[in-house]
Structure formats: C-alpha cells, structure tokens
Amino acid sequence: MVEATVTEAPAIMGILNVTEDSFADGGAFLETESAIAHGLELFAAGCTVVDVGGESSRPGASVVDASIEEARVVPVIAALSPHGVVSVDTTKASVARAAVAAGARIVNDVSGTLAELAGELGVGYVAMHRRGDPTTMSQLTDYDDLVTEVLDEVLSIAERARAAGADPIWIDPGIGFAKDADQNRSLLKAVPRFARAARAQGFGLLVGLSKKRFLANGPSGQHYEVDERAEQSLAAATWVLANGATMVRAHDGLDHVRAAGLVGQTGADR
C-alpha cells in the first residue's frame, strides 16, 4: 500500500468530485467509470494525492445521505488506491471509515470534526478551518484578527489529530469557507506565516483555492466565470507553493504539477 507523507517538495492534490453539484465540475465524474478514469489521469499527470469527494462543500450545497456518499466514493477509492495516495474528502465518520477500508490514506475534513477518527484509523489528516456549514458559513465571516484566529484554530485541530495518532497532518486555512473575498486575499498574503507555523509543529500546509469565487474579479472590473479562472488559479497556486505551502489542491492536475516542479527547481524560499 502506498503511504502518505509530508514532503518539502511542492506537491499537488488532484480534485476528483464524484458529485452532481460541485461548483467547478459537478456531474462531470458522477459515474464510477469516468471518475476512476479521471483519477488515473490525475496520477499520470503527476499528482501526489487524488482527493475523492462524494458531497459538495460549496456554499449552499445540499446534504448528501451517507449511504449515497459512500456508494459514490468507495468503488472509486478502491480502484485508485493501488496506483497512489488517495484521500477522502468527507465530513462523515461512516464515510471516512468505509473510504479508509477501501484504501484511502488521508481524511480531508473541511469540518474539523474527524481529527480523532483519523488517529483511530491510523491515517493522515487535513485540518481545515471552517465555521458553520454550507448553509450558514457565508454569514459567519466576522473576525477580530482573521489570520491569528484561523491559524490558532487549525493548529488546535491538528494537535488533536496528532494526539489521537493521525500521521501525517496538514493544516489548511480554508480559503472560501466562512471568508469573504478580501479575507481570502488576506489569507493568501499570510501563507508565509502559516507555512512557518506548520513547519515548526511538523505539519504540512495545504492550500485549496482552485477556481474559487474570490478569483472571479479582474483588476479592471471584469467578472470571470468558473471556467475562466484557470490562469488565476495557477498563478495563485504557484505563489503559495513558492512561499511555503507543501501542497495545493487543484482541478487542473497537469498544469499545477508542472508549476510545482518549477517552484521546486528554482529553490524558492520555502
């Protein structure tokens, strides 16, 4: 079985949404065979991890019954796990258990509630910052000190996961989750601080920003739809990798793998 590790070399987590309503590619890989094929493409492109999710976590997303979510992700994970490290993107304990039994080596948890479970299961864990849930998080954007509060909260979740036995562990500032556009940009600027804090504690830093809404506004008032945000996503990902992030979660695997390779070759200050 392929094991998950935190490395200093910039890495890409390829996104595989086995959903019907994810904001960027909902429905594109809902069928099991197409999802498996895309996951293999992401590995072939050089993605270090393929992240399989069966429920959208975007603002306003509908809740998916655990049995449906499990039926979506388990056969895909079982087929992909012999080929590389697979993570499961879920907030449900039962789905996480089934996914790990099928071969997932990381629990990517946007809710911050599965830290202890990841330790119990003996797998890696992504501790992400979020307030509320998809129906409420857009109204929960009041912070006294955004960067400090987000950093303290994700480090606390990560410490819980480590105490329970999870390994390896990444922290994730949760760009787009209970943050407005200006706050998302502030978190991007703070990536060097997050990277230093993660490194000091022996954690990785994962940043997910691919095609998100805050990338929609251009410098001259343009508005870019989801399928027009590839260049912004790639530019932002390259910047965060050059400034200490150890992994970026992305839809366009090959482009981001190439960018990560360039960052690694240039010896950027990480």
Image (spheres, rainbow, N blue to C red):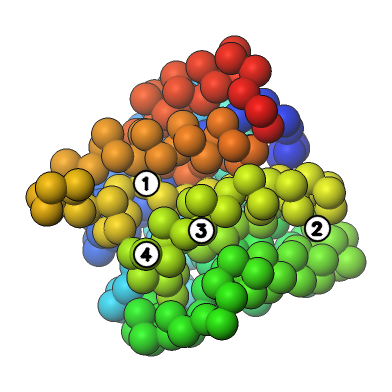
Location of the C terminus (image quadrant): top right
Alpha carbons under labels 2 and 3: distance apart: 26 Å
Can you name the residue that lies furthest to the front here? 220
User: Along the horizontal axis of the image, is 64 left or right of 70?
Assistant: left
Report helix, strand or loop for mark 1: loop
Mark 3 crowdedness (10 Å alpha carbons): few <14, some 14-19, many ≥20:
many
Q: Which residue is mark 4?
A: 182
- Amino acid type at circle 1 is Ser
User: Along the horizontal axis of the image, is 51 left or right of 4?
Assistant: left
Relative depth, front residue between 123 and 128: 128
Task: Give yes or no for contact between labels 1 and 3 (Cβ–Cβ under 8 Å).
Answer: no
Q: Which residue is mark 2?
A: 166
| Residue 253: quarter of image | top left
Alpha carbons under labels 1 and 3: distance apart: 15 Å
Relative depth, front residue between 150 and 208: 150
Report helix, strand or loop for mark 3: helix
| Residue 181: quarter of image | bottom left
User: Along the horizontal axis of the image, is 77 left or right of 117?
Assistant: left
Q: Earlier in the sequence, mark 3 or mark 4?
A: 4
User: Along the horizontal axis of the image, is 27 left or right of 13?
Assistant: left
Q: Where in the figure is residue 217, as x and y percent of width and height?
A: 20, 54
Q: Residue at x 37, y 34 (%)?
A: 235
In front: label 1 or label 3 = 3
- Residue 187 marker: 3
Q: Which residue is mark 1?
A: 210
In the figure, 94 relative to 242: above or below? below
